[in-house]
Image: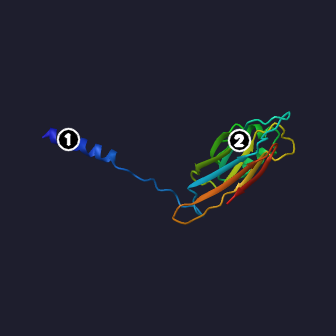
Amino acid sequence: MVQPLIILLLASLLWGCSTRTRAVSPTLAGPELDSVRVLIKADPQLNRFESNPHALSLCLYLLKDPNGFKQLVQEKEGIPKLLDCSRFDATVVNARQIVVQPGQELKEINETGEGARYIGIATGYFYQGKRRVTELSLLSSQLGDGHSESRVRIELGPQEIRALRVE
């Protein structure tokens, strides 16, 4: 009598562990993005220093809210902190470091995670001064087959970010 009961319990346990469950995400205002497709195009003279091009470190941030990013950009030690590519506050959904070579063209697809509405980039150009070394933009979505995606084009010049376009 005990043996059939044990077999039944084990079978229930194994069946319960093997079935798939889907997490239900909370409903937010506006469409959720599934992914961000990023195209990075670097100038052949990227990060020029003493007449030579160099590789460039770029941090790509997906954010729920832009205010923490904006605040760091304004602070004296903010850019080095952004170049750590870390979650500097709770609004950072994803942070990723990418090293770009002169003349390189990269294509990346990033899952947005929950609630990402903005993209921010910080770059480690040799000359920072008053040049464009950070950019921030609202992500857009293109809804069609139930999925949404933002397309981002980043153009990197010899000494600053030339453009960040979200399509």
The residue under label 1 is 7
Q: Nearer the viewer, residue 13 or 79?
A: 79
Give residue 72's position: percent from left, percent from top. 76, 44
Give residue 48's position: percent from left, percent from top. 82, 38
Q: Nearer the viewer, residue 103 or 30?
A: 103
Which quadrant holds residue 133? top right
**Cα gap from disc 1 to disc 2, whole angstroms:** 56 Å
Under mark 1, the amino acid is Ile
Mark 2 residue crowding within 10 angstroms, few (<14) / some (14–19) / many (20+): many
Who's the residue at 81% across and 43% down the image? 158
Q: Is residue 65 visible?
A: no
Give residue 165's position: percent from left, percent from top. 72, 56
Residue depth check, mark 1 versus mark 2: number of the one nearer the observer: 2
The C terminus lies in quadrant: bottom right
Asked which colour scheme the image uses, the reply is rainbow
Q: Nearer the viewer, residue 72 or 103?
A: 103
The N terminus lies in quadrant: top left
Under mark 2, the amino acid is Leu
Q: Is residue 9 visible?
A: yes
- The disc placed on residue 58 is 2
